[in-house]
Image (cartoon, rainbow, N blue to C red):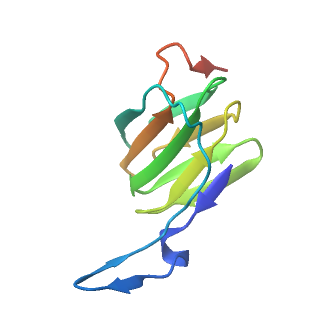
Amino acid sequence: MLVIRKSGVKDEIREGYTIKRMVTFPIKSNLENVGLYLTNIPVGGKVSQHYHPKGMEILVFLKEGLLKSGKKEWMMKEGDIAVLKPGEVHEISGKAETELIAIRMPNYKDDKIII
């Protein structure tokens, strides 16, 4: 898993705006589709341990949440990103009200195995 902290990425000043180059990574050139999911996890709630055997997933945190993978855990802040390769087990807990966008590539309906 790759975790990118918004606070650790420098601003690039442009004419009239700024950008942050959060992450660049290779993807399949013949990507069938992409799924975008807005996920809300209440305090005390969680997305149980699971993985996606066929596709990668990108998690963009809009509100903080606890991300676990194996024995590692990260308190993700607003703007932080996690990039998960196929097969990486992960779980997200709402220590506070958590909100994130999950981007799945490719997006297969049956591509989620709960542990």
User: Is 19 rendered above or below residue 38?
Assistant: below
Q: Position of residue 95 (x, y in %)?
A: 47, 50
- Outermost residue toward the front? 29
User: Is 75 rendered above or below residue 108?
Assistant: below
Q: Looking at the image, how many numbered discs can be counted on the residues?
A: 0
Depth check, front residue: 2 or 100: 2
What's the residue at 43%, 28% (across, down)? Answer: 33
Depth check, front residue: 60 or 19: 19
Q: Position of residue 72 (x, y in %)?
A: 73, 51
Give residue 57's quadrant in the image.
top right
Depth check, front residue: 2 or 20: 20
91 left or right of 32 in image: right
- Outermost residue toward the right? 71
User: Is 49 rendered above or below residue 59?
Assistant: above
Q: Quadrant of the C terminus?
A: top right
Q: Position of residue 73 (x, y in %)?
A: 67, 52
User: Is 70 rendered above or below residue 106?
Assistant: below
Q: Position of residue 22 (x, y in %)?
A: 50, 65
Say whether residue 38 is visible.
Answer: yes
What's the residue at 48%, 34% (across, down)? Answer: 104
Say whether residue 44 is visible.
Answer: no
What's the residue at 44%, 36% (across, down)? Answer: 45
- Outermost residue toward the left? 16
What's the residue at 44%, 39% (across, down)? Answer: 103
96 left or right of 93 in image: left
